[in-house]
Image (tube, rainbow, N blue to C red):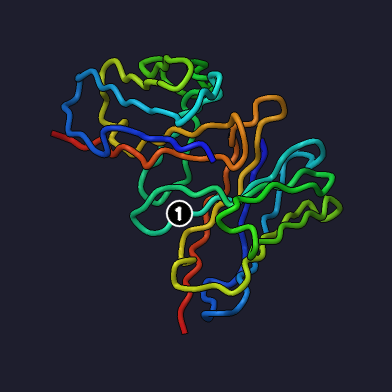
Amino acid sequence: QVQLQESGPGLVKPSETLSLTCTVSGGSMSNYYWSWVRQPAGKGLEWIGRIYSSGSTNYNPSLKSRVTMSVDTSKNQFSLKVDSVTAADTAVYYCAREGGTVTVLFYWGQGTLVTVSS
Amino acid sequence: DIQMTQSPSSLSASVGDRVTITCRASQDISNSLTWYQQKPGKAPKVLLYATSRLESEAPSRFSGSGSGTDYTLTISSLQPEDFATYYCQQYYSTPRTFGQGTKVEIK
């Protein structure tokens, strides 16, 4: 069974860069899309973007200028960076994996809270 | 971007009630629609995908229907463990987009 676990700082200062890593266990990273989704407290889900195991990416245009995703299949990890964060970036960040042929987010990490505050 | 409009935003229902949640896309998404259930402090879980295909671990009281731009999630007989927030999401194109959620509360 595939398992995902987010890790990274829980507190980031305004204007700095938010960096998170998702570690994958229980399966190969190859031939799948790996995604990031965030959820501010008490609000809905926002898709940040995804990265294929080969490294190709799709980003949400609302965040595209500030987001970078990368993947390291040798470490079974993929990462998210969000530049120039503000309080509006405070949220629970989830990493997730799409199905192979059905590109639905079947597998999710538990989520990690990132707070942007000085 | 495809906008997903979900309704209602919340509802109160009793155990045993039939519950219906609707989701409207701003363009035809060709049945590329999934429903998630999310409980407080937990990650979302897939209930249905491709409009009506039940995820393997989801109870059969959940069903989905629709086509084109209009989709529906139905819970045939609400159970205590079904009190949660439900989200639709289109996976027809990127960026993936979610409905704003429907919180199902105990009446």
Q: Position of residue A23 (x, y in %)?
A: 70, 54
State whether residue B7 is above or below residue A76.
above
- Chain letter of disc 1 in the image: A
Residue extending farthest left? B107
Q: Residue at x 28, y 39 (%)?
A: B103
Q: Assess disc 1: are there few (<14), some (14-19) or many (≥20) residues with their C-alpha within 10 Å of its C-alpha.
A: some
Amino acid on which the number 1 mark rests in the picture: Gln
Secondary structure at badge 1 equals strand
Towards the viewer: A46 or A64: A64
Q: Position of residue A10 (x, y in %)?
A: 53, 71
In the image, taking residue A17 as reference, residue A118 lies left or right, namely left
State whether residue B95 is above or below residue B72.
below
How many numbered circles does the render carry? 1
Splitting the image into 4 quarters, where does residue A21 fall?
A: bottom right
State whether residue B82 is above or below residue A65.
above
Quadrant containing the N terminus of chain A is top right
In the image, taking residue A37 as reference, residue A3 lies left or right, namely right
Q: Position of residue A106 (x, y in %)?
A: 59, 34
Q: Residue at x 41, y 21 (%)?
A: B71
In the image, taking residue B24 as reference, residue A110 lies left or right, namely right
Write down the residue under mark 1. Answer: A39
Q: Position of residue A114 (x, y in %)?
A: 50, 67
Q: Residue at x 55, y 72 (%)?
A: A85
Splitting the image into 4 quarters, where does residue A97 fall?
A: top right
Q: Residue at x 20, y 19 (%)?
A: B16
Towards the viewer: B100 or B36: B100
